[in-house]
Image: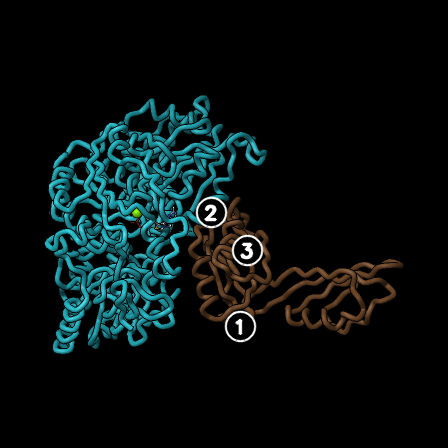
Amino acid sequence: MDKSNKSGAEALLHSLHLEGVELMFGYPGGAALHIYDAIFNQDHVDHILVRHEQGAVHAADGYARATGKPGVALVTSGPGATNAITGLATAYMDSTPVVVISGQVKSNLIGTDSFQETDMIGVSRPIVKHSFLVQRAEDIPEIVKKAFHIATTGRPGPVVIDVPKDLTDPDHKFEFTYPSEIKMRSYNPPKSGDLSKIKEAVDLIEHAKRPVIYSGGGVIQDDASDELTELARLLNFPVTNTLMGLGAFPGSDPQFMGMLGMHGTYQANMAMHNADLIVAVGARFDDRITNDPNKFSLGAKKIHIDVDAASVSKIIHADVPIVGSAKECLSVLIQEIKTRDLAIDQDQLSSWNQQISEWREAHGLNHSLLELGPQNGKILPQQVVQSLYKETEGKAFITSDVGQHQMFAAQYYHFDKPRQWINSGGLGTMGFGLPSAMGVQLAFPDETVACVTGEGSIQMCIQELSTCLQYGLPIKIINLNNAALGMVRQWQDMQYGGRHSSSTYENSLPDFVALAESYGHIGIKVSSFDDLESAMRECISLKDRLVFLDVDVDPNEHVYPMLEAGNSMDYMWLGKDKKTW
Amino acid sequence: MKRVIALLMENQPGALSRVVGLFSQRGYNIETLVVAPTTDPTLSRLTMSTQGDEKVVEQITKQLDKLIDVVMVSDLGSSDFIERELMLIKFKKDSFPRISFEDSDVVSENNEIINVQVVGTSTELDALVKEIEDSNPIEIVRSGSLGISKDANTLSIEN
Ligand SMILES: Cc1ncc(C[n+]2csc(CCOP(=O)(O)OP(=O)(O)O)c2C)c(N)n1
Ligand SMILES: [Mg+2]
């Protein structure tokens, strides 16, 4: 036990250190200044000064997603706290372990509309897993311990610690003790699943003729990719991953059908629709997956493994619900399968796998678009992603923003490893890409970190280019510049008669090369297909510098496949004039 | 179908707002809500009634259970239980009806006003409200439902 006299601010910092925090992201202000002074006076926890609090939380989130360790952000009260809200909501929707510490006005001023006072606990309530308003400085160590415990266990999620300024006063010292363990009577996340349910699952697996393994972000969060991969290989069942789950099963493996859902592959969506058994692991059947839930895969029995009981049977009824950690449940499931001599009908299974190959051949994604050269004189956005894949040998960390570029990155970069693909799937937050890449790059200074973005999204947190210079973060920004809010325009093309209401910028875009240079980085412009691959090579080879690769891509390209709203998963647009029904 | 859900939560600032916030956030329709401390000062008991089918109630209880401040949740309707609600009614003396309800008491009376207290299930109270409509009660106040299971099951924690 660590005993010494500390102020609230010092206790906070020391508690973070004892939680293993090496790095946090933040932005100072009045209510947080005692804490900032305590940061100055210690050297365990580094502080990265961002340029906007949204960036701080996204960076902490990116760090958490890439490492599996909790990310920490520190903001001041009022505007600092409200600026952090989008970051919190992003982390909440994707269940990532982020701890946000917000300064608060002095205890005696709370409720008086004092300067820079915002009810952070109230404002953040629906978008946090839990929050704490510190009431006594002496409680800080225990609150930090609880906050990290809650953020990282069960279904992870963001936790806010709101700290009134007077409780960090350097003149008020108390004896610091850090709890070695925490028990909360009201919080006991499940670990192993019910064995009888797992046995039922094995029965269903044994009799499946058209099975699909459908896995999501929960598998990555729980570091259960090895178990998932083992299960899939053991059974020779086809696998699909959600947008959040990419990398949980190797993306370049022939057993992998690609992503499913709204912009999922033809074969993955067809397989889901026609399956007779869906083994869902760490996925939550959200609306971007199921399309109309009443028409969702009606012929399939569903096994649903999830650590969050409330996710099971929330949207789609689970025939076999298994509530527990993905890692634990999968290990037990694998053991059960191994101890029983399963009589899976291999003929049926291989004709099912054959069927999937046929679907893939008929309408799967073309992963050799680079070989086609320019299309109508233009670069396809997909070709840029393929070029990035090639030059990084499929090994880079890829963060992304939100829009067409995000979907192209998800579809065309094969993620072989968990935590390699980092994007805002649940909230769909434009502006996530660059700051989250900072978190990843700081965690992995020697790895290539690329942010696949669009000219719309990148401008939502562009100020972080300055942070990248200050800390020497050699991020590769791959801007798929279609001079439009492409995904919005795609919907306007498909559903609003091509009326492009406020989705273009009328020649008001900045010169991104000059912009990158003014921030002290390198900018490269690519307008012709012939320059694409050499520019990409140069971009990736500049190991120590941030490079902003601004690529003009075909502005008329749409993302396909795309599910037709209100139908089952086999209703897909496959091209502008091509659909499955 | 009317359902009654009871829960124990940490008696801490912010806990109630988390529970109440969850209802509006997730679009649950709450008919009545009662909160009071328990004999254990660290815990409050909250009882709510709602309309909903099995699936809705299952979701509500699961989501409530997920809140960190919520220690225990019970769908009282899952076994036999007793539901009671208290109602206070104010009448002008000259229009005071003869209430046929058995569990009713006059709790105050003067030349002008009579206040009556009635205890019953909320369905009984609904019926009574209809019945006394013609007597033009000046004010009706209802407490919301409380519930307790008939069997040995209790909503309590071992310390
Ligand atoms: C903060 C935020 N505001 C609005 C949206 C809605 N939205 C989704 S995609 C998109 C267009 C994104 O444009 P861009 O970043 O250029 O990507 P593109 O689709 O062109 O590849 C918009 C506005 C969003 N997801 N996030
Ligand atoms: Mg764009």
Nearest the viewer among B157 and A562 is A562
Give the residue displayed 53% in from the left and 48% down from the top: B11
Q: Circle 3 marks a residue in which chain?
A: B
Question: Is the C-beta of the residue carrying label 3 under 8 Å from the nearest atom of ligand 1?
Answer: no
Q: Are marks 3 and 2 on the same chain?
A: no
- Which numbered marker is on residue A125? 2
Give the residue displayed 33% in from the left and 53% down from the top: A487
- Which numbered marker is on residue B80? 1
Q: Quadrant of the N terminus of chain A?
A: top left
> Which chain does brown denote in the image?
B
Residue A317 on image: x %, y %: 36, 70
Of callouts 3 and 1, the N-terminal one: 3
Regarding mark 3 in the picture, which secondary structure is present there? strand
* Disc 3/disc 2 C-alpha distance (Å): 21 Å
Q: Which residue is mark 3?
A: B45
Contact flag, marks 3 and 1 (Cβ < 8 Å): no
- Which numbered marker is on residue B120? none
> Which chain does cyan denote in the image?
A
